[in-house]
Image: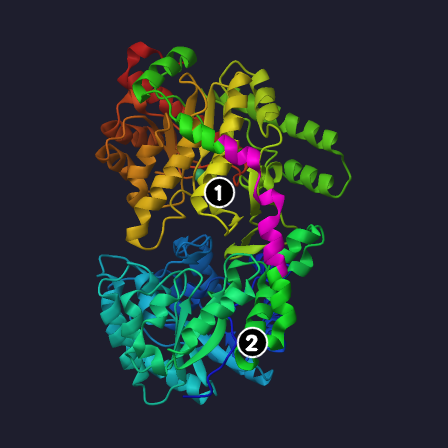
Amino acid sequence: MATPFTATILGAPRIGPNRELKRAAEGYWAGRVERARLEEVAAELRRQTLTSLTRSGLDSVPVNTFSYYDQMLDTAVLLGALPPRVQGIDDELDRYFAAARGTAEVAPLEMTKWFDTNYHYIVPEIGPDTTFSLHPEKVLAELAEARELGVPARPVVIGPLTFLALSKAVDGAAAPIERIDELLPLYVQLLAQLADAGAEWVQLDEPVLVTDELDNAAKLAHRVYTELAAAPRRPDILVATYFGALNGALAALARSPIEAIGVDLVAGGVQAVAAVPELADKLVVAGVVDGRNIWRTDLASALDTLDSLSGSVGSLAVSTSCSTLHVPYSLDAEDDLDDTLRTWLAFGDEKVFEVATLAVALRKGRDAVAAEIEASNAAGANRAADPRLHVGATRARLTSVLATGAQRGPADQRRAAQNARLGLPLLPTTTIGSYPQTIAIRKARAALRAGEIDQTGYEQQMRSEIADVVRLQEDLGLDVLVHGEPERNDMVQYFAEKLDGFVATQNGWVQSYGSRCVRPPILYGDVVRPEPMTVEWITYAQSLTDKPVKGMLTGPVTILAWSFVRDDQPLADSANQIALAIRDETVDLQAAGVSIIQVDEPALRELLPLRGKDQQEYLAWAVAAFRLSTSGVDDTIQIHTHLCYSEFGEVIGAIADLDADVTSIEAARSHMEVLGDLNAVGFTNGVGPGVYDIHSPRVPSTEEMVASLREALEAVPAERLWVNPDCGLKTRKTDEVTASLRNMVAAAKAVRAQRYPSTGTS
Ligand code: GLN
Ligand code: ZN
């Protein structure tokens, strides 16, 4: 074995501390930025990352975790597995971007969530004609670049099991994993080339081993890594796993002659690792610093964890639990953070410092880092005692609401009460909430931030946007209106800014996919709603029209999923606190005369645990939190929910259990399959399968939406069917939206007239 290292992280962010790569890439796509400039920005970001990691004391530094777009797409390029439709594009980088984003001629590859994180990867397509071939230029170039800088470089590549398991079979091909034996010779070649280029270590990422995705995971892992370890010339191999525990695959992996295994000791327990005797001659890369949440590490308890392993494994290195891709770069960019809170947190840079500190303690004893341990203890004690984490009023109310039963009346009774109150036509038309975020809206928000207009001026401008959107909807003849959400920068951040217990960061950007970044708020304390959050906007919109305007709220699970969440209590408890605040908002909306309230849960699927055995428990508390948030109003209030962004298969039962009166759900691309699935679980409430795909600028014709409604009516009686697009309209242009909705309303009227001539078509 090469010298075992002692301190590392599994990967680093690449979008840039000031989102430099985002700006350069988007400029390049728009033709504003030269290729050379884009490459320069990328090289400079890599150089900064590598030198900063090395200077911070890591003795093994990940390279090739840079990406122009996504690491799975990089791996598809590495293995020659780009789909035929982009192969005609000569230029390498343009071909790569075409696969990621599509062009006028070719459709992009799909994108989906990277395990249970909020990062989205590009899904490689493996067809019957895919032939793999090795193209290691990127990893070799980045390795050379790092070695030139004197960095102790450890190239990182996604392993063959994870690559295939996360790829998608197309054109009738067999499951990609069946082609594992075609990939192994390429990895063997790659290992030789990396060794020749001076790499002492290589990291192969196999997070798929913490899921139930592979049958025979343990056997497969053992076979694959026994074969790769037998490569005649190679660096030492670290197989990195993260986001959960390996279960049986850990011992199997340890029985193969690789040199090191990375385990996530934040998501998985340490005892299971200590209990594997086969690790006695391995380097265990112990992920004790949370790579995906923003809390400061309790150094003393991390050292206890490390100590509990040191007797049973060959050697130990300290690491983050996963790549720090999932957290912002540095706390230094947060000027406004309150000083107390700051001491509780660690972003990317601070995590590297923690890793280095822990490694020093391992080498030289705790006394060598006594000051750091003390600071960490003090921060922990201070955080635990902070009154904002223990708000008696919130806790007492939650207990009492839960005790009195957070329940609504039976669904049919509610339906009768709501029909009598609302008097809607059959096949009512509506939208999901947001209307285009116009340039005027963005300008007003920027002007408010810059102090050029005051809150009153800003609110005036938002009101005029709302008035425009209401007028537009009346002109189009929609039945249930929305206010358009102009005042919301983001559907989670908006609420986080209004609730105590949350703090928004200034610069805490995290890559969500490609050039897109999000800034998740931090839920650090007990949730308190100091005042109504949406009532003024909705009642203003309602004052402009006789049609019902939906109150529009984000659900507790989605707020959790898109925030950094406190780690000192179960997620379910935090979900309930948020649910209580949303519930209070619904009660205020009811008092203000609002008759329909939508509570969006697009992220319901996102928090689903990676292991099947944990999923029921999650779904139970997620559904309970939603029901807590929607059961404070009486039966005449129609509760809507909205879901999108995912394959609903595994959560379809939970969607039915939400028991919303009306569920709008993305379906335009999955051809109404979702209706059959809902029927199969006995769902009998209202449902609005999206009749057109808002993710494209195309204006759908009336005829195609008529066809799609007819298809829906095969599965659902007209009394339950709603007509709506498949998601919010904020990313679209006003003229596209106007044309599409005009056709949608016409389609609803045509179907009403054909099928139910007596009910009228107005
Ligand atoms: N109400 C939100 C909107 O229309 C829902 C967004 C979403 O589904 N992600 O924008
Ligand atoms: Zn949506």
Q: Which amino acid does label 1 sit on?
A: Ser
Residue 98 vs 635, above or below: the answer is below
The image quarter containing residue 754 is top left
Q: In terms of image quadrants, where is residue 19?
A: bottom right
Q: Residue at x 50, y 67 (%)?
A: 302
Disc nearest the viewer among 1 and 2: 2
Q: Quadrant of ligand 2?
A: top left
Q: Does the magenta stretch include residue 735?
A: no
Q: Could you tell me which secondary element the residue under label 1 belongs to? A: helix
Residue 361: give its label: 2
Which class describes the residues within 10 Å of circle 2: few (<14), some (14-19), or many (20+)? some
- Residue shown at the point (53%, 16%) measured from the top left: 593
Residue 522, given in percent of the width and then of the height, sits at: 57, 48
Would you say residue 691 is visible in this rendering? no
Specify whether 648 is left or right of 74: left
- Any part of residue 531 in sight: yes
Q: Is residue 230 left or right of residue 699?
A: left
Identify the amino acid type marked 2: Ala
Quadrant of the snapshot with the C terminus: top left
Q: Which residues make up the magenta segment?
A: 378-397
677 or 390, nearer to the observer: 390
Query: In the drawing, does residue 28 fall left or right of residue 218?
Result: right
Q: Distance between the residues labelled 1 and 2?
A: 34 Å
Q: Residue 574 carries which label?
A: 1
